[in-house]
Amino acid sequence: MSEKVWVCPTDLIKKSFGNLKSFNEIKFVDLKQIFENSYFKNREDVENDETLRQLIPYVVFQKETGEILVVKRTKNQSEKRLHDKISVGIGGHINPVDEEEYSAEMTFFNGLNREINEELIINKLNKLEYIGIIYDSSNPVSRVHMGILFLAKVNDAEINEKENFESDWMLPSEIVKLDTTKMEDWTKVSLKALEVPIVGKNEN
């Protein structure tokens, strides 16, 4: 059976928010219309359909001491276009199992909670802060997705799906030294939004 994922018409997103940049400080309450007009469709039918955007909760994890969880996606992951890419975001598709019949917003949060708990073992989530939306159109993967960016403050966390990720906790002063050509575009957008410098060795 094909996986079904939550999607929203691209035209509605553009109509709601106008000319979007890679990162946008949009109030969470203003996403209500997007959520309420999203629906489930077979993933195989939407992977290359730019008339729809797949909604993705994208959570950056940070310890109270400042270190950010940095992961690299292995070749075991289903999205081949992101293999071996460095990422600071944990998240994934929202599926029918997440659906809350009378609350589209809860459907979103059910998907967020399921995804981060599938991928991480979290030692005390102290804060979950909404940051904004990622609307990057620089590559074929991004053009069919919209990220909803959060920052999670935790005591600690470790990767549950070790076959899918390699991971390390890094201070911003260490992240700045990473090769930015190996970073996911959403990671670059997220780090800039969180005011973490990313002048890697291959960027001026």
Image (cartoon, helix red, strand yellow):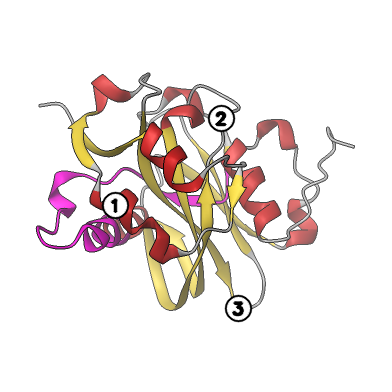
Q: Which mark is residue 64?
A: 3
Quadrant of the rendering where the N terminus is positioned:
top left
Q: Quadrant of residue 188?
A: top right
Mark number for residue 35?
Answer: 1
The residue under the point 14% across, 45% down is 96
Residue type at mark 2: give it.
Ser
- Work out how far the residue at label 2 is from the one at label 1, CA to CA, in angstroms: 20 Å
Residue stretch rendered in magenta on the structure = 87-113
Mark 3 or 2: the one toward you: 2
Q: Is residue 201 above or below residue 174?
A: above
Q: Are marks 3 and 2 in contact (CB under 8 Å)?
A: no
Q: Give x and y (percent) for residue 11.
A: 39, 33
Residue at screen point 72% across, 31% down: 181
Residue 143 against residue 179 in the figure, above or below: above
Q: Is 19 inside the magenta-drawn segment?
A: no
69 is higher (above) or lower (below) than 54: below
Give the number of the disc on residue 137: 2
- Based on the picture, tell me whether residue 101 belongs to the magenta stretch: yes
Circle 3 Cα neighbour tier, 10 Å, few/some/many (<14 / 14–19 / ≥20): few
Q: Nearer the viewer, mark 3 or mark 1?
A: 1
Q: Earlier in the sequence, mark 2 or mark 1?
A: 1
Q: Give SS at disc 3.
A: loop
Pointer 1: residues within 10 angstroms few (<14), some, or many (20+)? Answer: some
Picture quadrant where residue 171 is located: bottom right
Disc with the residue nearer the chain's start (3 vs 2): 3
Secondary structure beneath disc 1? helix
Q: Nearer the viewer, residue 86 or 27?
A: 27
Q: As shown in the figure, which amino acid type bears the numbered disc 1?
A: Phe
